[in-house]
């Protein structure tokens, strides 16, 4: 034990001696230059280095001590002195930012307050919709600090302009007449009720109450609903969509609706997949197209089924699609790319606006779509040289669909068309194809009639036409009558052809209904043309006998259509009213009303009564149909009361007759005998018969 301890002490002493020895050797070495970095060996071994050359670690271990090459010392950066000019600019920017922040603070608090209750309601999972111009990749979302809702705008909305083919031309005269007539009390007791009804039909400022409406006043989604941030939309269940699509394929009566000529079923399925497939990111155009097409399909399903429960479900799905379309429409940018998808989306939106009796919205949308299609060259045949036949046909159908709607709305609203016929080279679709369907044939004639409608406004009711002599306008009217009759002759020929029997076999009474509605539209247009003709020499009536005959025929064709529908067909009639009675200026009722007042014809009074009764079952389905029914009902009551007074041999005094005539003229029904210059201060020397425009104004939209 002693020997082992002694040996250990000897080892420790030897180690201590060696350490002192090495320290002595190091101390005896001259001091080498100090490097800023450790030697390469110490850096690799990750041990401390005294940065002497050689270092102590390398000396002890016998390693080769090397140092990295000396790097060049970086030049010390110099401070850039900012002049007082830049300091002043920075100060001004800070002040401006503070001013902007102060202006935005109220809007930030307002948006936060409005977002608070919305955040409390649970959100449903919906497919994501990407706005136009936004990348499909995920991007950080932001909320604008300034208002994005139309409701925050405090500016006074401007009323929609209506030209000489509407009621707006008689507003100034109506104001003066009403101020004097309402203050009198000379009406006989039996006419007081009728006068009060007329007072209610005319607003304080001389305008007819809105039967169709601006989008901002009747559509809460487009008028006061906030612009939604990038969010989700709920869609009808895919199973319900597939059910109605299968019904469409299996029921040939769907042919009269379909997806319109500008959208094939195959292409629609592509849009449908993008909207419903998880992971896909549809654009707003895709979303509008799908919802617009589904609205048509669900509506047709409602019309074709007798199951009350199915009708209720289809109605709910259709309402959902309508809300989606309107919300997506409000989020479309002002400047859209001129693509076929966007033009198709706007076309579906135009159809929805007409179906909803939102005439001003339809006009805004159709003019935008027309400008986009013209910019894209849809109206020129030369632009389709390098395209497939399918794409060429789709563009042609899109353009002519928009063309026909734009011409009809131009006449209805009394505004000039934005389409120049001499600039169109794309051919009109032909109807002599043996494989053509009944609906397609009807649509082609509708396009041909829209060409005439554009000429009616330009040649008979535009300010330039009203400045012409009555003889010249009568000549133009005669030429338009012949052109309209030529198109109507095609309807008669088509309805008697062998192909018509095939159509009836396939689609049942749908073909017959389309022909009836066509005839109503043609006779209504014919009445509008003939209304501009002066009465025959020696006649005591305001309208020519041809005009009265055409008006009677139009009402008879309307009754034939309603009888073909049968009872409990209110939904059918509502669709028919929006696309026939309200879409085109429906002059026949007004013309017959005036003739009853002048002649006391009891048979014509019966025609008015039957027409009003035919709208009774449809007035619950839309506000526009309810309003037009109310107005026609009021006019019928007045005519009936007037006939009762005449047949009872009770003479009205001159003052009462004058007051009655003033109210009728204020409604734009009878032409005033004052000149255009006296009433509106525009065109000197034009007779009242030349400017009597709004006898057909009951189908106009304010």
Image (cartoon, rainbow, N blue to C red):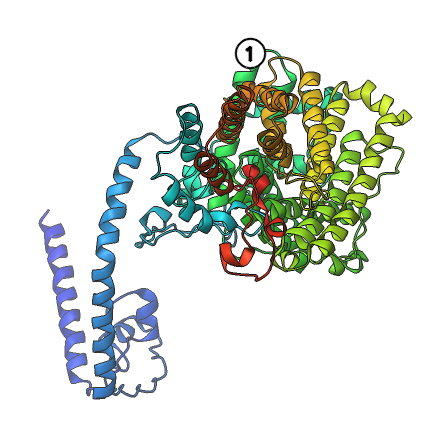
Give x and y (percent) for residue 496.
87, 26
Label 1 Cα crowd, 10 Å radius (few <14 / some 14-19 / many 20+): few
Residue 68 in the image: above or below residue 591:
below
Q: Quadrant of residue 501?
A: top right
- Tell me if I can see residue 281 in this picture: no
Q: Is residue 493 left or right of residue 282?
A: right
Give x and y (percent) for residue 416.
61, 55
Q: Residue at left 22%, top 76%?
A: 50
Judging from the image, what secondary structure is the residue with disc 1 in?
helix
Asked whether 187 or 369 is in front, the reply is: 187
In the image as oriented, which residue stretches furthest toward the left? 2
Q: Residue at left 77%, top 44%?
A: 481
Q: Is residue 489 left or right of residue 221?
A: right
Asked whether 194 or 657 is in front, the reply is: 657
Q: Which residue is mark 1?
A: 308
Give x and y (percent) for residue 480.
76, 47
Residue 29 in the image: above or below residue 185:
below
Residue 553 in the image: above or below residue 263:
above
Counting labels gives 1
- Tell me if I can see residue 61 in this picture: yes
Asked whether 637 or 642 is in front, the reply is: 642
Q: Residue at left 52%, top 41%?
A: 701
Asked whether 445 or 519 is in front, the reply is: 519
């Amino acid at each position: 034990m002693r020997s082992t301890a002694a040996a250990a002490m000897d080892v420790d002493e030897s180690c201590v001696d060696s350490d002192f020895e090495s320290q002595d050797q190091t101390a005896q070495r001259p001091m080498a230059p100090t490097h800023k970095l450790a030697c390469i060996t110490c850096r690799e071994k990750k041990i401390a280095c005294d940065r002497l050359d050689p270092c102590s670690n390398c000396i002890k271990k016998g390693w080769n001590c090397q140092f990295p090459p000396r790097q060049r010392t970086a030049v010390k950066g110099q401070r850039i002195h900012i002049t007082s000019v830049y300091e002043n600019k920075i100060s001004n920017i800070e002040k401006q930012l503070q001013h902007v922040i102060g202006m935005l603070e109220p809007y930030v608090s307002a948006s936060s307050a409005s977002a608070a209750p919305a955040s409390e309601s649970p959100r449903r999972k919906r497919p994501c919709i990407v706005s136009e111009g936004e990348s499909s990749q995920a991007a950080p979302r932001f909320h604008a600090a300034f208002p994005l809702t139309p409701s925050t705008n405090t500016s006074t909305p401007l009323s929609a302009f209506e030209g000489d083919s509407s009621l707006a031309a008689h507003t100034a005269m109506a104001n003066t007449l009403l101020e004097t007539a309402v203050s009198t009390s000379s009406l006989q007791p039996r006419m007081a009720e009728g006068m009060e009804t007329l007072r209610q039909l005319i607003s304080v400022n001389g305008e007819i109450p809105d039967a169709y409406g601006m989008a901002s006043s009747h559509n809460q989604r487009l008028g006061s609903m906030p612009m939604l941030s990038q969010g989700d939309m709920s869609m009808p269940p895919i199973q319900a969509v597939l059910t109605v699509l299968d019904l469409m394929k299996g029921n040939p009566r769907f042919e009269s609706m379909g997806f319109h000529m500008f959208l094939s079923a195959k292409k629609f399925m592509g849009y449908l997949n993008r909207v419903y497939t998880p992971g896909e990111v549809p654009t707003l155009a895709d979303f509008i197209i799908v919802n617009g097409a589904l609205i048509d399909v669900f509506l047709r399903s409602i019309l074709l089924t007798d199951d009350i429960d199915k009708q209720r479900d289809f109605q709910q799905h259709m309402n959902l699609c309508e809300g989606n379309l309107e919300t997506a429409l409000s989020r479309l940018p002002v400047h859209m790319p001129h693509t076929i998808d966007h033009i198709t989306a706007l076309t579906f939106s135009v159809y929805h606006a007409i179906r909803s009796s939102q005439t001003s919205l339809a006009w805004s949308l159709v003019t935008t779509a027309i400008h986009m299609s013209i910019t894209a060259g849809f109206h020129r045949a030369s632009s389709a040289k390098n395209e497939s036949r399918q794409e060429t046909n789709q563009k042609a159908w899109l353009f002519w669909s928009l063309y026909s709607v734009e011409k009809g709305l131009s006449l209805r609203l009394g505004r000039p068309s934005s389409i120049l016929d001499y600039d169109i080279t794309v051919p009109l679709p032909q109807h002599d194809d043996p494989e053509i369907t009944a609906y397609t044939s009807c649509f082609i004639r509708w396009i041909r009639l829209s060409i005439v409608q554009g000429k009616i406004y330009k040649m008979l009711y535009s300010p330039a036409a009203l400045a012409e002599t009555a003889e010249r306008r009568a000549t133009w009217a005669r030429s338009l009558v012949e052109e309209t009759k030529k198109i109507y002759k095609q309807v008669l020929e088509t309805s008697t052809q062998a192909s018509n029997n095939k159509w009836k076999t396939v689609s049942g009474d749908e073909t017959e209904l389309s022909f009836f509605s066509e005839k109503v539209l043609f006779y209504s247009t014919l009445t509008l043309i003939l209304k501009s003709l002066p009465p025959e020499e020696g006649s005591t009536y305001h309208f020519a006998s041809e005009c009265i005959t055409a008006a009677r025929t139009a009402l008879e064709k309307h009754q034939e259509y309603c009888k073909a529908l049968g009872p409990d067909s209110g939904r059918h009639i509502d669709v028919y009213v929006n696309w026939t009675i309200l879409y085109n200026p429906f002059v026949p009722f007004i013309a017959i009303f005036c003739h009853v007042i002048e002649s006391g014809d009891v048979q014509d009074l019966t025609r008015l009564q039957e027409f009003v009764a035919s709208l009774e079952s449809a007035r619950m389905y839309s506000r526009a149909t309810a309003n037009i029914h109310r107005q026609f009902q009021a006019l019928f009551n007045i005519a009936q009361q007037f006939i009762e007074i005449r047949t009872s041999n009770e003479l009205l005094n001159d003052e009462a007759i004058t007051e009655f005539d003033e109210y009728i003229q204020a409604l734009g029904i009878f032409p005033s005998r004052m000149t255009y210059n006296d009433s509106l201060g525009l065109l000197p020397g034009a007779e009242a018969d030349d400017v009597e425009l709004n006898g057909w104004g009951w189908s106009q939209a304010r």
